[in-house]
Amino acid sequence: MHTATQSPIEAARDKVHAVCMYCHAARLNKTTWRVLPEGTMPSRQVSHGVCPNCYDQAIKQLIFEMKSLTA
């Protein structure tokens, strides 16, 4: 159940760990991603996501590929 200061989306995010599909880091809170020790699973439900570092790398790669298609 969400509090008066949380939106339903924020309340749901508190119940689910996003795990980066590239590096497998888990989102621990709104701003913190950390690679968990091997064999460790978050205590909450897990969903896919992309951590900020991998997102930046993926966008750079996408831009590079798009430029090579138009060159």
Image: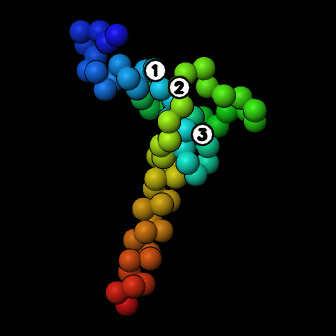
User: What x and y, as percent, mark residue 46?
Assistant: 54, 31
How far across and down, in percent of the image, does residue 6 sit? 28, 17
Residue at the spot of label 1:
15
Q: From where the camera sits, is residue 33 visible?
A: no
From what the image shows, is residue 66 above or below residue 49? Answer: below
Q: Is residue 37 visible?
A: yes
Q: At label 3, which amino acid type do we have?
A: Ala
In this view, 68 is above or below 11: below
* Label 3 environment density (alpha carbons within 10 Å; few <14, some 14–19, many ≥20): many
Nearest to the eye among marks 3 and 2: give it: 2
Question: Which of marks 1 and 3 precedes in the sequence?
Answer: 1
Q: Residue under circle 3?
A: 25
Residue at the image point whose x is 71% and y is 29% from the top: 40
Q: Residue at x 25, y 13 (%)?
A: 5
- Residue at 26% across, 21% down: 7
The answer to whether the residue labelled 1 contacts the one labelled 2, judged by CB atoms less than 8 Å apart, is yes
Distance from disc 1 to disc 2, alpha carbons, whole Å, reads 7 Å
The residue carrying mark 2 is: 45
Q: Residue at x 45, y 65 (%)?
A: 60
Query: From the viewer's perspective, is residue 70 above or below residue 46?
Result: below
Question: Residue 59 lies in what quarter of the image?
Answer: bottom left
x then y, percent, for residue 49: 47, 43
